[in-house]
């Protein structure tokens, strides 16, 4: 079950991330000293290592292998720990959840306005036979909930921008300098 969830996570994060993500990457590997120094300089308080390795942009070489099943002991990563890593990856490398919230709010607001207008027309046409009920209250509730979703999505966009500014990542990472002292 956990293997399936990991596969779904890596597929999803690779689709919605603005940085190319390495699928099924656990962080294990040999790293050049320059890569390690750059990772140290980034000063990430809560690093999503799987994304940082891709983000710094150095050349990568892969050695694929089949991981044998664990014979002894148990993993120290619980479902909640893995969920925390997944949320860190989503929030650090994607704005899609924020924009999805905004678009959902816009859709629900538009739908509420259409249904409200339809309800108003039906009430005006069938004035004596159409009972009011609680439909106007529900339509208004959905509309105001949609407005809140839109506002929350916009605030989230600002928080995402603040995150980018606070991270202070360098615009360019030099692989090497030639003919400079």
Image (cartoon, rainbow, N blue to C red):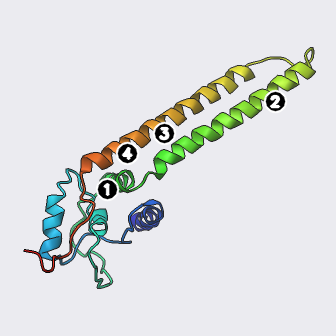
First in sequence, mark 2 or 4: give its number: 2
Q: Residue tagged by mark 4?
A: 160
Where residue 36 sits in the image (x, y, percent)? Answer: 15, 69
Of callouts 1 and 2, the N-terminal one: 1
Q: Secondary structure at mark 4?
A: helix
- Please tell me whether mark 1 or mark 2 is closer to you in this view: 2
Tell me the crowding category of disc 1: few under 14, some 14 to 19, or many 20 or more residues within 10 angstroms, Cα based: some
Q: Nearer the viewer, residue 99 or 90?
A: 99
Q: Are marks 1 and 2 in contact (CB under 8 Å)?
A: no
Numbered circle sitting on residue 65: none
Q: Using the rendered view, name the quadrant where residue 147 is placed.
A: top right
User: Which residue shows up at 47% across the image and 62% down it?
Assistant: 12
Q: Is residue 81 above or below residue 132?
A: below
Residue linked to disc 2: 118
Disc 2 secondary structure class: helix
Please name the residue that numbered disc 3 is placed on: 153
Splitting the image into 4 quarters, where does residue 134 fall?
top right
Mark 1 vs mark 4: in front: 4
Report how far apart the C-alphas of labels 2 and 4 lie in the structure.
38 Å
Q: Residues within 10 Å of mark 3 (few under 14, many from 20)?
A: many
Q: Nearer the viewer, mark 1 or mark 3?
A: 3
Marks 1/3: CA distance? Answer: 22 Å
Quadrant that contains the N terminus: bottom left
Mark 3 → mark 2, Cα distance in angstroms: 28 Å
Mark toward the start of the polypeptide (3 vs 2): 2
């Amino acid at each position: 079950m956990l293997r399936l969830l990991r596969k779904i996570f890596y597929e999803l994060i690779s689709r919605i991330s603005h940085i190319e993500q390495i699928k099924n990457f656990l962080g294990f590997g040999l790293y050049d000293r320059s890569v390690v120094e750059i990772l140290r300089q980034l000063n990430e308080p809560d690093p999503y290592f799987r994304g940082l390795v891709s983000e710094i942009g150095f050349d990568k070489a892969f050695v694929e292998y089949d991981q044998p099943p664990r014979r002894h002991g148990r993993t120290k990563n619980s479902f909640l720990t893995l969920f925390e890593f997944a949320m860190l990856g989503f929030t650090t490398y994607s704005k899609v959840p924020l924009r999805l919230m905004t678009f959902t709010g816009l859709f629900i607001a538009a739908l509420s306005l259409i249904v409200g207008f339809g309800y108003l027309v039906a009430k005006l046409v069938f004035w004596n036979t159409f009972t009011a009920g609680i439909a106007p209250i529900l339509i208004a509730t959905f509309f105001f909930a949609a407005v809140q979703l839109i506002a929350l999505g916009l605030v989230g966009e600002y928080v995402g921008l603040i995150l980018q500014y606070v991270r202070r990542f360098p615009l360019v990472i030099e692989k090497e300098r030639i003919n400079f002292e």
